[in-house]
Image (cartoon, helix red, strand yellow):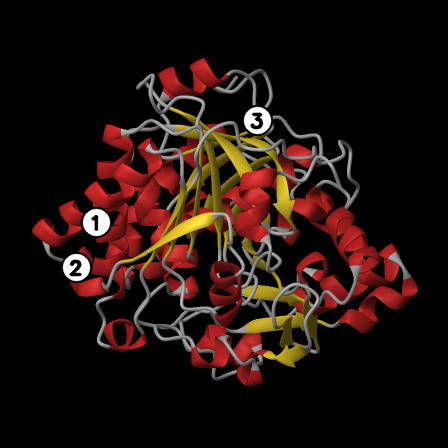
Amino acid sequence: MTATGAQPPTLLFYGDDFTGATDALATAAEGGLRSLLFLRVPDDALLERAGPLDAVGIAGAARSMPPVEMAAELAPIAALAQRLRPRVLHYKVCSTFDSAPDVGSIGAAVAALRPAAGVPWTAIVGGQPQLGRYCLFGQLFAAAGTGGEVFRIDRHPTMSRHPVTPMGEADLRWHLAAQGLAPLALLPWTAHEGGPASLQTALDASLASGPAGVLFDVADAPQLRMLGGLLRRVAADATLLAVGPSSVVDALGDGRMVRAPAGIAPARAPVLGVAGSLSPLTARQVAAARSFVRHTVPPEHLLAETARTAAADAAVADLQAGRHVLIVSTDDEQEAQGDGRRIAQATGQLLAQVLARVPLPRIGVAGGDTSSHAVQALDAWGLSHLGRLAPGVALCRLHSERTALDGMELMLKGGQMGGEALFEDLVHGTAAR
C-alpha cells in the first residue's frame, strides 16, 4: 500500500524545469493517467489529499543548479521514489538535452537518483518526434521552432548558442559522458526494424558489457510505441530510472492519445504575460502579441528592489484598467555574465508582487528558468492539466491554499515552444479553431 492508493504509481517524474514538468503532466493526463504535478515534494498528507494517482510529478529547477545543489534537490525525490516504488522514475529533461558538467548536469542527476532504482542501468530516450526532436545513431536533431527546419543540435541556430548551456556536441553519448554518465550503450533506430522481439534481443546484447545506461534512438512515433513496450517489460519487477523528454511518458502510455486535448476558452479577464526567454521564437511571439500592452523591464531594474516595485506598479495599473499586460525582460550580456538565475528569481518576485495586488484568472510565462522561479515565488502546492495551447505548451490549473491564487490558469513555456500567435491564443483561446 502506498499513499497514492493500493498500487504503486506507474510513474514518478521530476521535471528539471517547470515548463518541461507541465509538458510531462499534459502528456500523462492526455494518456489517461490520473496525474498531478506537485510544486514541492509531497508528504503523505498531501498525497492523500490529491487522491489516487497513476503519475506523480514534481516540478523543480535542477537544470539551473550546480551539481552540489542538484544532489540536495534530488535527494528527497529519491527518498519519495523509495517510498512509492513507481515502475518508472523519470528525470525529465529538455528535449534538446542542453546541460553541462557544471550546471544542470544530467550525470549528477542520475547519480543522485540511482539509489532509488532497482534496474541496474539507466534508460535514456533520445528523441521526441511530436516536438521535432529526433535521435539517429546517437546524434540529436531538433527543429528550430514548431514545424521549423531540423538541425543537428550542435548546429541548431538557438541551442548551439545557448547563453548558459550551449550544445557543442551532437552525440549524446559524448555529451553525457562529459557529465559523468558513462559508459553508454546505444540501441540504434535500425534495431526497431525486426519488431519487438528483435528490439529485445538488441537490448540484451547491449547490456552484456554492463553499461551504466542505454541510449535509445527515436526517429518516429511508431518506434516510440515499440520502445514503450520494451520499457514496460523492463520495469515490470523493479523501478527503472529513465532520462529524457516527455517522450518517456508518451512511451509508457503506448503512444496513444486516450483523451483528446481540450480546446482553450478565451480568457474572462485581463491576462498577464511574462517573457524572460532569449529565444528568437519567443521574440517573434512577443512581437505578435498585439492584444497586450508591453512593459519592457531591463534586467538591472529587476535586480533593484525600488525599480522592480515601480515596474509592478505600472503593470498593476494597466491590469486594473482592463488591459492585457506583457512584461518583457531579456539581455544576452547579463545572461553571459552568469546573472541569468538572479534575473529569473527577480522576475518571479515581480510576478508575485503583481498577483498580490490584482488577482488574475490567467497568466503565461515564457522561459525555462524564468518559469521555474516565477512559480516558486507563488504560494501554491500543485498543478493539474487543463489543455494544450500548442505542442509542448500546456495550460494548467494552479492549486493553492490562497483563495486568490487557487484555480488560476497558468501557461509555462520554454523558448523553443509554441507558434508565433501563442500569447494571442492565451488571450483569445483555441476552442473556436
Q: Amino acid at mark 3?
A: Pro
- Nearest the eye: 48 or 321: 321
Counting from the top left corner in percent of width and height, residue 87 is at 60, 37
User: What SS does tag 1 mark?
Assistant: helix
- Is 369 positioned to the left or the right of 413 in the image? left
Tell me what residue is drawn at x 25 percent, y 55 percent.
69
Q: Disc 3 versus disc 1: distance between alpha carbons?
A: 47 Å
Work out whether mark 2 precedes mark 3 in sequence or the reverse, and give the earlier one. Answer: 3
User: What SS does tag 3 mark?
Assistant: loop
Q: Which residue is mark 2?
A: 301
Q: Quadrant of residue 83?
A: top left
Counting from the top left corner in percent of width and height, residue 285 is at 52, 60
Work out whether mark 1 precedes mark 2 in sequence or the reverse, and give the earlier one. Answer: 2
Q: Which residue is mark 1?
A: 311
Tell me what residue is drawn at x 66 percent, y 72 percent.
186
Q: Which residue is mark 3?
A: 8
- Is 33 positioned to the left or the right of 4 in the image? right
